[in-house]
Image: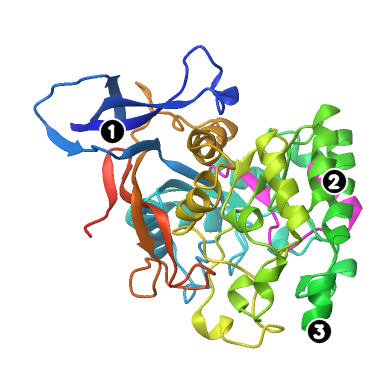
Amino acid sequence: MILIKNGFVYTIDKKTNRQNSLRSASFNKMDVLIDDNLIVKVANTIDENCETIDAHDKYVFPGFIDLHTHLRDPGQTNKEDIYSGTRAAAKGGWTTVCAMPNTDPVVDNISTVEYLKRKAKDIGACKVLVIGAMTKKSEGKEIAEIANMLESGIIAVSDDGNCIQNTKIMYNVMKYVSKFNIPIIDHCEDYFLSGKGQVNSGRMSTKLGLSGIPALAEEIVISRDIMLSESTGCRLHIAHISTKKSVELIRQAKAKGVKITTEVTPHHLLLNENECVNFDTNTKVKPPLRTQDDVDACLTGLLDGTIDFIATDHAPHSDFEKEKEFSIAPYGINSLETAFAALYSGLVLKDKISLSFLIGKLSTSPAHFLQLNCGAIEEGMAADITISDLQKDICFTPDTMMSKSNNTPYLNKSLKGRITKTICEGNTTWEDRD
């Protein structure tokens, strides 16, 4: 058994439905007792002769759950693999990550699903849930072996990294997937509009002399897929939302009763297009960093419940790839290790959101969405726990990062909110020894 003593524990009002608990949660000084892989007791004081973790002046959260992680395994393990990626996750406080299928080969069949599950079980430092492809090779032409992959335990389907351009194919995928009650995770991008765009279309693209990606490239596909979801009854989840109009489209769809959810990344909540001014390829991401108006709209949507979750879209790339010219460097930000500290420093410490609200969006809400036995610190829940010293700084350097890749705009920068210990199913997966 493990006893966590004297910490400020994330507590959900038991009179409140967990799905609607983000504003009723609070922090109370309590003890937490773990036996094997479960939380067995939460109380003001627990006396037990067992391994004890002193969490004095620290905050005790349910482990974070990332709905959008690129582990790059199989086939792109120069960027990341399950070993390095799950250790980066553990250092960042994540106890569950959902692995996107745009690997090489694409996760579009039962054998690749089984490979990921076996490898994660053998060497992973957190739980890995597998997302299967919607179409074979994510080419948007032929529906993948979704029923077979479901038998192996995929939790959703997505062609993330690609967007199905053919509306008829997308309609057929939605009709098919609606039978299984799993969500489609939708990367929304009209390639004819985005073209070879590098940054947000507008003032910054003109200033830098780079081709732009217009907001409409995202918004027009969201509009299309909302209508398809409404017609088919398919559960639709919009990945990495980034524009003001997109947020409004989701808000309207929810008001109409469409089965739709969405996520926003830390970088689309914290950074705007001005970060690209020095051609820093660590700010090159898709969808691109948008205007401050878009950033503000995403935060408003998060606060009013239009946006359901914060997900990292952890997209590691090797140094030699990101050291290329901006126009040919790949899109993507490494985010698992930096996400909590960046959000805490950039939103909570600036009084834009509360700490309990942030934890709800990182843990409680995604756990409810995926119907997992975690996301709360309560008796009978999985012993997935993250402990943080909010007063401690953390500096992200190539020497200290667990990920194979360093492509983060927070490189060599210090932020508040260090994760001091991560426990997954009762096992310590990260411990800060500094």
**Res 88 → quadrant:** bottom left
Residue 272 seen by the camera? yes
The answer for how far apart the CA atoms under marks 1 and 3 are is 52 Å
Residue 242 seen by the camera? no
Question: Which residue lies under the disc numbered 2?
Answer: 225
In this view, the residue in front, 114 or 425, is: 425
Question: Which residue lies under the disc numbered 3?
Answer: 209
Q: Which of marks 1 and 3 is nearer the N terminus?
A: 1
Question: Which residue lies under the disc numbered 1?
Answer: 7
Q: What element carries label 2?
A: helix
Q: Count the numbered circles shown.
A: 3
Left or right, 425 with reference to 285: left
Other-residue count near label 1 (Cα within 10 Å), few / some / many at <14 / 14–19 / ≥20: many
Q: Which of marks 2 and 1 is nearer the N terminus?
A: 1
Magenta-colored stretch includes residue 168: yes
Quadrant (top left, top right, bottom left, bottom right) of the N terminus: top left
* Image location of residue 36, percent across then percent down: 24, 32
Other-residue count near label 3 (Cα within 10 Å), few / some / many at <14 / 14–19 / ≥20: few
Q: Do the residues labelled 2 and 1 touch (CB within 8 Å)?
A: no
Quadrant (top left, top right, bottom left, bottom right) of the C terminus: bottom left
Please report the residue visible at 90 percent of the width from the left and 40 percent of the height from the top: 227
**Magenta-drawn segment:** 153-174
**Residue 119, placed above or below residue 278:** above
Q: Is mark 3 on a helix, strand or loop?
A: loop
* Image location of residue 288, percent across then percent down: 72, 65
Q: What residue type is labelled 1?
A: Gly
**Residue 391, placed above or below residue 308:** below
